[in-house]
Amino acid sequence: MIGLSNFLTATALPLNVILERMADGIFESIKIFMITIILSMPLGLIVSFGRMSKITILRWIVNAYISIMRGTPLMLQIIAIYFGPYYLFGVSLSNDYKFTAIIIAFVVNYAAYFAEIYRSGIESMPVGQYEAAKLLGYTKLQTFTRIIWPQVMKRILPSVTNEVICLVKDTSLAFSVSYIEMFSIAKQLASSTASFTPLLVAGVFYYVFNAVVAFVMSLLEKRYSYYK
């Protein structure tokens, strides 16, 4: 039986070569993560307002959107958005559209999760705070931005952190439409070299990336922990 050390090193590439070959994939994974965060978090806030809207039709539409996004796998959504235009409308797909489809899928999926997090935080605020702000002459916008939102952020940060950490790992799902990101390259290298080392490198990357994300989010939590 081949020992673990032999399995790890069989026809293995040097670590520096593995990192060099995975560099572009790591950049792509980080790019997917950053663009998704930048677009999905503000979109999630807009969706949360629709979720709480007094307009019944709008509320139903937003509820259906959130239900679909949270009730179906992200991988399926990526595939559907990428291949949908071709199978539904016969539109030819360029290779550049692959990245666009991935970003659309990630953004609309995570916006749905962030929307529910925002909604739970906003609806948890006592009505008395809105009434007090109105008596003090604050407009609705001033009330939300200066009084409600800072408190909401304090309450929802742990939930937001969990979603952001999940996003780091979910970037690997881009492989479902053959997009070359870090995990795809790691699998290719592991297969071609009969070595587990590239997958270990991928695991270390995800762990370190998540550790950095958790550290940054913990700093934000401390900043908002003004009652301690």
Image: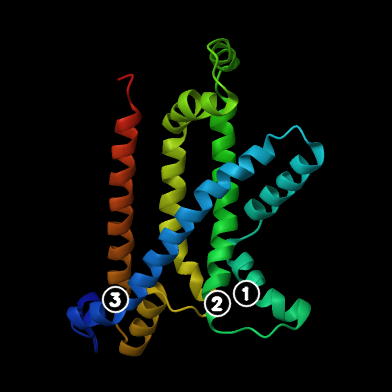
What number is the disc on residue 123? none
Amino acid type, callout 2 = Lys
Mark 3 Cα shell of 10 Å, populated few (<14), some (14-19), many (≥20): some
Tell me if label 2 and label 1 are in contact, CB under 8 Å.
yes
Q: How is the image coloured?
A: rainbow
Task: Identify the element where label 1 is drawn.
Answer: helix
Task: Identify the element where label 2 is drawn.
Answer: helix
Quadrant of the rendered image containing residue 60: top right
Say which residue appears at 50% left-offset and 71% top-offset. Answer: 174
Mark 1 Cα shell of 10 Å, populated few (<14), some (14-19), many (≥20): many
- Quickly name the residue at label 2: 98
Q: CA distance from mark 2 to mark 1?
A: 6 Å
* Residue 228: x %, y % from top left: 30, 20
The quarter of the rendered structure image containing the N terminus is bottom left
Say which residue appears at 53% left-offset and 65% top-offset. Answer: 103
- Give whichever of 4, 214 is nearer the camera: 214
Amino acid type, callout 3 = Ala
- Give whichever of 75, 192 is nearer the camera: 75
Quadrant of the rendered image containing residue 73: bottom right
Amino acid type, callout 1 = Tyr
What number is the disc on residue 23? 3
